[in-house]
Image: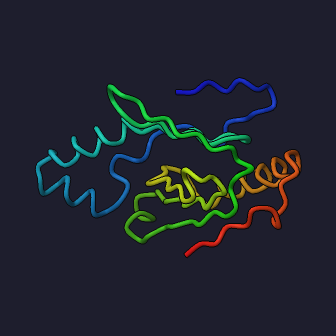
Amino acid sequence: MTKVPLPDERILFKGHPAVIGSVTRLLISIFTLGIGAIWYWLQSINTKYLITSQRIVIERGVFSKDIETLEIYQVDDIQLEMPFNQRIMGTGNMLLLTRDISAPKLLLNRLPTDVRELYEQMRPCIQQARFRFHVRDEENPREYP
């Protein structure tokens, strides 16, 4: 996983998506006698999330790695998704609407943390980064369908 090089950069979340992050996945794992759980585990360990006060890094893959990096000042909006079957399991999703051309929408699935609390930690970091890089809302406004 990417190291945090800057001294003023702090880690807000580091980890994998939850293996069994919803009741649906739990039931599939039970009905397939654990085969579904093994499949979900393989998916989970091959995806790593790093959210810091300055960037978001998603690393996917086993042999070939796909690393997607987003500077936090590019985040325009954060939508929290907490479906009932995930709330029971203590997970949630975060959809980031960004100014990044390569990833205008970035979905962080089954985060095994309180996504509302993570959002509250990210919000001042986004505002500070936007101020530091002189990003205003009038510049490059995005239209979301």
Query: Taking 38 as reference, is 5 left or right?
Result: right
**Vertical arrangement, residue 114 with respect to residue 68, above or below:** below
Total numbered labels placed on residues in the image? 0
* Residue 124 drawn at (x, y percent): 80, 54
Q: Quadrant of residue 115?
A: bottom right
**Vertical arrangement, residue 85 with respect to residue 111, above or below:** below
* Residue 88 drawn at (x, y percent): 41, 64
Query: Taking 19 as reference, is 133 left or right?
Result: right
* Residue 74 drawn at (x, y percent): 70, 52
Query: Taking 6 as reference, is 142 left or right?
Result: left
Residue at point 33% right, 29% down? 62
Q: Nearer the viewer, residue 25 or 59?
A: 59
**Vertical arrangement, residue 82 with respect to residue 130, above or below:** below
Q: Quadrant of residue 41?
A: top left
Q: Nearer the viewer, residue 76 or 19?
A: 76
Q: Quadrant of residue 132?
A: top right
Q: Nearer the viewer, residue 28 or 107?
A: 107
Query: Taking 101 as reference, is 109 left or right?
Result: left
Residue at point 52% right, 27% down? 1
Q: Nearer the viewer, residue 82 or 136?
A: 136
Judging from the image, the colouring scheme is rainbow
Residue at point 44% right, 35% down? 66
> Split into 4 quadrants, where in the image is the C terminus?
bottom right
* Residue 21 drawn at (x, y percent): 38, 54
Return the residue found at the far bottom: 145
